[in-house]
Each structure stands twice: as structure tokens, then as C-alpha cells.
Amino acid sequence: MSKYFRAENYYAKTSYKPTKRVSWEQSNLDVGNINALRLSWYRRTQDNGASDEYGYNNIEISERWENKRLSLNVEDDDIFRAINVHYDNDRIMPPNYNFFSKILFIAMAFGKVGFYVFTATFFFVLLVLISSWLFGGKSSEYLMSAVKSSFLFSFSIVFFSLLLWKGGRLLENKFPDIVYAMRNKPLWQLNRKNGLFIIYDPKKAWEERLSAPFYEFDAYLESSPDTQGSPTYSLMLYHPETGVRQKLDAQFPPTNMPGELVAAWQFIQRYMDVSQPLPDVPALEIHRHKDPTTAAVDKRKGRNPRYWRDMTEAEVEKIQEEKYRKNIRLR
């Protein structure tokens, strides 16, 4: 390993290690809270992440972004300026999707949920109708009429939901540049190399609203009711000294499963901790060899550099499902 690739030469002095958070807490005992659920800092960071981080399609997306970066021959800040996203061993700057992309993602989500919900509802109603015919004395004419009405009602909604869901997926595969249309205005940046969390002004591209060491922030789960009145949670970083707060929805979407965002907070801490290797997730695999701490640990453990890429989609999805079931129990 070249001396220039050693950790002490690669990371800035401001890079994050858990001991820095401990020292900061000892010097800032009277830090106030906000009206939200505060999450824990870990003395030893956990190799975990929200289940979305373990998606099989993240492999292809990461490779596409990296190939685009290589073709444009860009580094550092120029990466986001060139391809409107930055997700590698150096920093995380999530895409800032335009209005059309956001609407399409919402429509696809509603379509997927609607398809499963109304399909299940139709079969439940069908079961009730058959039971009422068998045991409730209802006539065959009543049964056929009710089944026909239920089918026509459900079919129209299921078909429309399927059109939103699969139609969106078709557009995603055929026209990714349109579907993933992103603005050249960064939202925020987690920088592993220098240990800073940067929040950008939403109205002025590239103007920093706040740049501070990662360990000065606290993580919170902020809840708000969805259309059904159930709580939906967002992960937020709050800087107590300035009162500035930033939701991380662009990378870690809101969810009604708070454990998923606890896992996302574990992922963030692990990502920023230069005393530990990068989180072992599919999208970061092609970048692991570029990070000194990660490369050294992988070499010592004999990790297969194609661990994720050599798996089938079914194998990755099984791990993703196991992560989800584990995460939803986190508090």
C-alpha cells in the first residue's frame, strides 16, 4: 500500500471517529433537545443500514453513476456538478429530483400499494360472499351479481394501480435520464474524508447554509400523520448550537417503520467513522478498495471484492428481507 494511501495521509484531521463525539458531549453538557425522538450515538459504529440500501438494483445504479463519472473524468465537487449525484467512498450527496421525477415516484409507490391492497381486498370480499352463499342462505343469483360487481370495481382500480406501478418501471428502464432527472442544486453532503456535514441553501445553488463537524449534530425522528392518520417518520439531523435542522428524506425516505430509520442512522455513523470500514452494502462495493481503512480490513479478512455482484437477485433480496425484519425491531 502506497504511503499516500495510508489512512493518516488520506483522511483530514477533522474526519470523524466516535471518540470525538465523546469529547464533544463532555464539553457540551447542556445541549437542548427539540420536540422529536432523539436517536443514540454509538461508541462502536454498527455495520447496518435501512433495507433500501441492500436493494439489488443499487448495484447497477452505482455502476452507471461510476461509469458516467469516469467517462467525464471528474473528481470531488465536480462529480455532483457533472452528474447531479455523488455516492461513493468519499461523500454522499443525494440527487435532488425535479418535480416530474418526484410525482412519478409517488405515483409508482401508490400504484404498487394499490395493486396489492385491492387485489387482497377483492379475494377477501369474494371469500365473504361465498361464505354467505354457503352458510347464509343467499341465492346463487345474488352471489353471481355481487361477485360481478366486486370484480368490476376491483379490476378497474387494480388495473389502474398496475399501470402506475409497472408503467413507471417501464419508463424507468427505457428512459432513465428522464425519470431520474435531477437538478444541479445539492441538498446536503456527508463527507467521510473530512468529517463534515454540509447543508446547502435550497434557493441558492451551492451556497452553504451550514458546514460543521458531523459529531456536533444530533439525529431525530420527526413524525407527521399520513393520509390515514398514521405516523410517518423522517430522519433529521439537528445542530443544537445554531438551531439548523436538515431532513435526510432524499437518501432515506420517510417511512411508518421507525426502526428502518434507526438503521439508517447506524449506516450514517458507520459511513462517517474512518476508524471502521465502509458499510457493506451493494452500492458501495465498487468503491471499497479506494478507502484506506476499508481496503485494509477487506484484505485482512479476505473479503471477496465481488461479494454482492456475484450474487443472484434472489440471494440479495433474501438478505434485504432479513435486514428489514431485523430493522423493524430496532428502537
Image: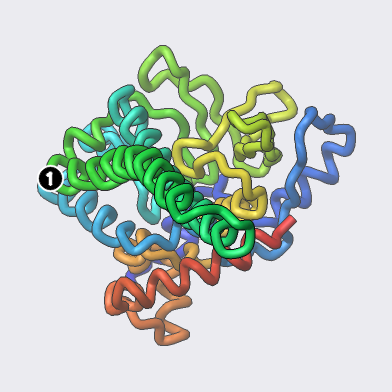
Measured as percent of width and height from the top left, residue 23 is found at 78, 49
> Which of the two residues, 181 or 190, is positioned nearer the viewer here?
181
Q: Tell me, what colour scheme is on the image?
A: rainbow
Judge left or right: residue 192 versus residue 245.
left
Judge left or right: residue 281 versus residue 99.
right
Judge left or right: residue 191 versus residue 70.
right
Q: Residues within 10 Å of mark 1 (few under 14, many from 20)?
A: few
Judge left or right: residue 251 versus residue 288.
right
Measured as percent of width and height from the top left, residue 14 is found at 56, 45
Residue at 47% of width from left, 73% of height from top?
A: 319
Query: What secondary structure is found at the residue carrying circle 1?
Result: helix
* Residue assigned mark 1: 174
Residue 128 occupies quadrant = bottom right
Residue 16 appears anywhere in the view: yes
Measured as percent of width and height from the top left, residue 327 is found at 62, 61
Q: What amino acid type is highlighted by mark number 1?
A: Lys
Residue 49 appears anywhere in the view: no
Residue 254 occupies quadrant = top right
Measured as percent of width and height from the top left, residue 81 is found at 26, 31
Residue at 38% of width from left, 22% of height from top?
A: 206
> Which of the two residues, 91 or 182, is positioned nearer the viewer here?
182
> Which of the two residues, 3 or 189, is positioned nearer the viewer here?
189
Residue at 36% of width from left, 18% of height from top?
A: 205
Farthest residue, direction right: 30
Work out whether 296 lies above or below 222.
below
